Image (cartoon, rainbow, N blue to C red):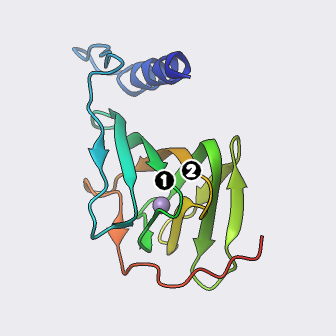
């Protein structure tokens, strides 16, 4: 899995700097970026975030891996230019504001449209990990809102 991610990053970097004169291909070595714990204001439960890549301008795509322990999730939030989530392990939940909770599994790909209020996380009994690919607008890729209070999930 790590090798697969590394190959993806290299391809993205090659694409993003392809036209610049002095731009150089940059390799971020596996294991060189220590994981961070999700800030309690923005997450419930135990959430581990690992940076993957942060593209150089004019590209503005940011990539990371987030692992949610059972019962952990994000607060409500939105993304100014949207977000792609690729579920890489476990079983999770995603919900759009005003819509039912949906269950997602390894291999599922979720598109969150720009400005749509939502949250994502693990189920109460399973861990979930996703790759998140998010574009930043003026350096900002997320707008945080309130915590998720009650989850109504029948799946
Ligand atoms: Mn999101």
User: Residue 102 at what x, y percent from top left?
Assistant: 70, 67
What crowding class fits label 2: few (fewer than 14 Cα within 10 Å), some (14-19), or many (20 or more)?
some
**Which is more toward the observer, 30 or 60?**
30
Label 2, label 1: how far apart the Cα atoms are:
5 Å
Label drawn at residue 127? 2
Question: Considering the image in quadrants, where does the N terminus appear?
Answer: top right
Picture quarter containing residue 42?
Answer: bottom left
Question: Considering the image in quadrants, where does the C terminus appear?
Answer: bottom right
Picture quarter containing residue 112?
Answer: bottom right
Q: Within 8 Å: ligand 1 and the Cβ of disc 2? A: no
**Which is more toward the observer, 71 or 81?**
71
User: Residue 19 at what x, y percent from top left?
Assistant: 36, 21
Disc 2, SS: loop
**Which is more toward the observer, 28 or 124?**
124
User: Residue 38 at what x, y percent from top left?
Assistant: 31, 55
Can residue 60 be seen by looking at this rendering?
no
The relative height of residue 10 versus residue 69 in the rendered view (above or below) is above
Residue in the image at 41% along x and 40% along y? 63
Q: Which numbered disc flags the more N-terminal residue, 2 or 1? A: 1
The relative height of residue 115 versus residue 86 in the rendered view (above or below) is below
How many numbered marks, from 0 up?
A: 2
Label drawn at residue 120? none
Residue in the image at 27% along x and 37% along y? 57
Residue in the image at 48% along x and 20% along y? 11
129 sits to left or right of 31: right
Label drawn at residue 69? 1
Disc 1, SS: loop
Q: Are marks 2 and 1 in contact (CB under 8 Å)?
A: yes
Can residue 146 be seen by looking at this rendering?
yes
Instruction: Please identify the residue farthest to the front as the structure is shown.
Output: 125
């Amino acid at each position: 899995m790590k090798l697969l991610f590394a190959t993806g990053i290299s391809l993205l970097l090659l694409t993003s700097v392809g036209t610049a004169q002095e731009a150089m291909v940059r390799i971020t070595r596996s294991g060189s970026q220590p994981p961070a714990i999700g800030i309690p204001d923005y997450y419930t439960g135990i959430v581990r975030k690992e940076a993957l890549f942060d593209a150089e301008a004019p590209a503005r795509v940011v990539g990371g891996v987030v692992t949610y322990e059972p019962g952990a999730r994000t607060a409500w939030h939105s993304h100014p230019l949207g977000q792609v989530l690729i579920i890489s392990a476990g079983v999770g939940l995603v919900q759009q504001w005003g819509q039912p909770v949906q269950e997602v599994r390894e291999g599922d790909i979720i598109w969150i449209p720009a400005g749509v209020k939502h949250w994502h996380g693990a189920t109460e009994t399973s861990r979930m990990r996703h790759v998140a690919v998010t574009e930043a607008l003026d350096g900002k890729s997320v707008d945080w809102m309130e915590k998720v209070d009650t989850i109504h999930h029948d799946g």
